[in-house]
Image: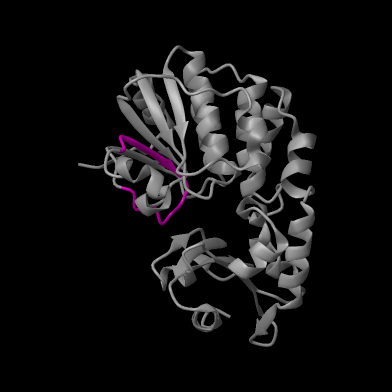
Amino acid sequence: MILRLTDISELAHKLKGCRNAVILTHAHPDGDTLGAGFGLCYYLRSVGIKANVLNSEPLPAKFSFLYKDYAPQKFDPESVISVDVAAKELLGDGLSDYADKIDLCIDHHFSNRMSAGDSYVDGDSCAVCLIIYELLKTLGADFTPQIANCLYTGIATDTGCFMFENTSPAAHRAAAALREAGAEAAYINREMFQVKSRGRIFAEQRAIGEMKFARDGKIALITITNSLIDSCCIDRADLDGFAGIPLTVEGVEIGITLKQQPEGVFKASVRTVSADASAIAQRFGGGGHIRAAGCTLNDNREESERMITEAAAEFV
């Protein structure tokens, strides 16, 4: 039976019974899944519990400050915890063996459909790192600068540096407390939101130059193809943040970014001003949050652009 934990104290009690754990993060990792994973890992290790963070692919270099002092520990895992993973397919092929063995799922997506022994899903939380912050505070944790950096990163990235609608007063309070604990906010904000590789700049120029509009400019769409990625010589981790570009155009209410995957399919990221992004993504088997969601389209570029635009047009 799947148990939905409804109180942070219940989650804290569950974690207290953990003797060692592997912490699963989602494929194509972002600041929230890695911040939550490493923040929780460093806390568990600080109280004598062995823990490792797992991902299905090499971790992006831009997040290296989160794991620069990390080294895997040797143990036979008794507990499997997932963070910021809304569905088992998001784990990626490299972690597929764990998909049906998750003991505890911690997430903030309303559309979460993970099958786990216990789940704590707070769809009102702006980031899983905010949940982990509240969890560790309940446990009386010592917020070291290392842990503070991890949790601040997830809160900052999932709120767009505190500019998105999901930014809550609780997020600001947590950020302030984490800065007091030693989080390097200025460094993290610059690395996450300002510094871009030269290839990323070229990719942005081309994508913006080919931006398409629909419904009198209320829908904007950009497409990142494999050929564009190859020609700009960029790592896929450099594509983080592209999803927010279409919504920066004046008058746009729904912004869509299509990113082609190595196998050819297109992953769509939907960002909205007032429409339900999750409802749009659900048309194609995806989901997410009200203002930010995603899905996968298995057709070619032209069909993918047409289908997602037509779906979005119903919400304008």
Q: Would you say 139 lies left or right of 103 here?
A: right
Q: Nearer the viewer, residue 244 or 62?
A: 62
User: Which quadrant of the figure contains the C terminus?
Assistant: bottom right
Magenta includes 253?
no
Q: Nearer the viewer, residue 230 or 303?
A: 230
Image x and y of residue 112, in percent: 39, 52
User: Which quadrant of the figure contains the N terminus?
Assistant: top left
Image x and y of residue 21, in percent: 38, 26
Image x and y of residue 154, in percent: 61, 40
Q: Does 94 sit above or below residue 239?
A: above
Q: Nearer the viewer, residue 243 or 69?
A: 69
Q: Would you say 164 lies left or right of 82 here?
A: right
Magenta includes 107?
yes
Rendering quarter of residue 51 = top left
- Count of numbered circles in the view: 0
Q: Is residue 6 visible?
A: yes
Q: Residue at x 65, y 40 (%)?
A: 61
Highlighted range, magenta: 102-114
Q: Does 135 sit above or below residue 196?
A: above
Given the current orientation, which residue lies at the most extreme bottom position? 216
The rendered magenta stretch, by its main secondary structure, is classed as loop
Image x and y of residue 73, in percent: 45, 20
Q: Nearer the viewer, residue 230 or 139?
A: 230
Q: Residue at x 68, y 41 (%)?
A: 62
